[in-house]
Image: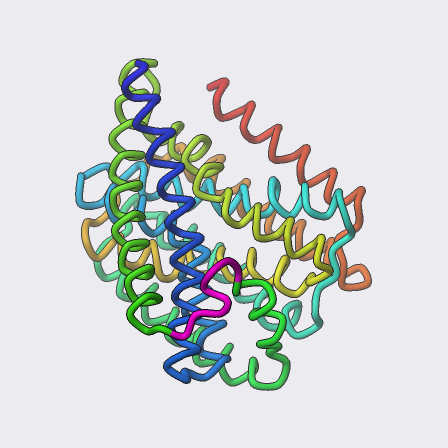
Amino acid sequence: MVRELFLLVLGLFLLIISSQWLIRSSVKLATLLRITPLFIGMVIVAFGTSTPEAGVGIVAAFKGEKAIALGNIVGSNIANIGLILGLTSLLRPLGVKKSIFKRELPIMLICTFLLYIMSLDLLISRLDGLIFLGLFLVFFLISYKGGKKDYDFKELQDFSFQGFLKNTTSLLVVGSVCMMSLVGVAVGANLMVKGGVGLAKIFGVSSWIIAITVFAVGTSLPELAASLAASFKKMPSISVGNIIGSNIFNILFILGTVALIRPIKIEQSYLRFEYLFLIFITILLIVFMKTKYRISRWEGFLLFLLYIFFVLLITGR
């Protein structure tokens, strides 16, 4: 048990640190290569914040641990709303841009319903994966077109450029950091999956339970840190937009990629509770945000309580 726990913690630590450096080095590298700021924010940063989920999902798929791949995505999306936005808005009420409310929020809800519909036959096939990836391309084009009007790259620079990368102009240095970070993500995800599967066997619980709780919270820690930092720096568009974008990215891109690697079989029980809870908390978030385009402290507290309730029910089954 000690060995499995050590692997899980070490993998999670390596995954989080590597993900942070990956996003920073990727943004810096793209800036040095004079890539458009809008593309940097919408593609590189979107992928960077979801790197832990992507790493775990892809590694789990190759290892045949499909329950971990799916459970981590569903659990992360629930944790992003209940745990991260809940805690962040408790510290400081979160405002949201009207453009996010009118564009990204409805897309996130559609993606969540689509996940449920695609799972009704208890299989997310390779064809389903292709559909998800195709829809991700459509989402990117829609967001790129709309993002030209309201994208603030200076806000992203202030948020992402930290440490020695802030002043360096060497492509070799930045590129090396980027590559080492990718290796760190792969190694960390592999250790985390190995440790998590081992713990599930020791405690006699399913890999799904481990993935939707422990893995989900663990891989969502970068989003939590980013959202808290953005809140303290009074950058609500990054705090809220990062979470919404991550949830969309998790379903369309990561789950689409995982399904292409290996089709995912789904238990009927997932549809009766976990999926429905994800739909419920997503709708609740939209209802809260519709009130003056913000999430108040009491609304954040309710989201957080709902997440605790969800975890207690899952672990108590």
Query: Which of the 4 image quarters holds residue 103?
Result: bottom right
* In the rendered image, the vertical position of residue 9 relative to residue 25, given as above or below: above
Residue at figure coordinates x 27%, y 34% from the top left: 191
Quadrant of residue 34 in the image? bottom left
Q: Is residue 69 magenta?
A: no
> Does 165 lie within the magenta span?
yes
Residue 232 vertical position relative to residue 273 in the rendered view, above or below: below
- Tell me the colour scheme of the image: rainbow
The boundaries of the magenta stretch are: 162-169
Depth check: give the residue in front, 239 or 29: 29
Could you say where residue 127 lies in the image, as x and y percent from the top left?
23, 62
Of the pair 127 and 210, the residue shown nearer to us: 210
Give the camera-side residue of 55 and 264.
Answer: 55
- In the rendered image, residue 245, in percent from the top left (x then y), is placed at 51, 62
Residue 117 falls in image quadrant: bottom left
The picture places residue 173, in percent across and down from the top left corner, at 32, 66
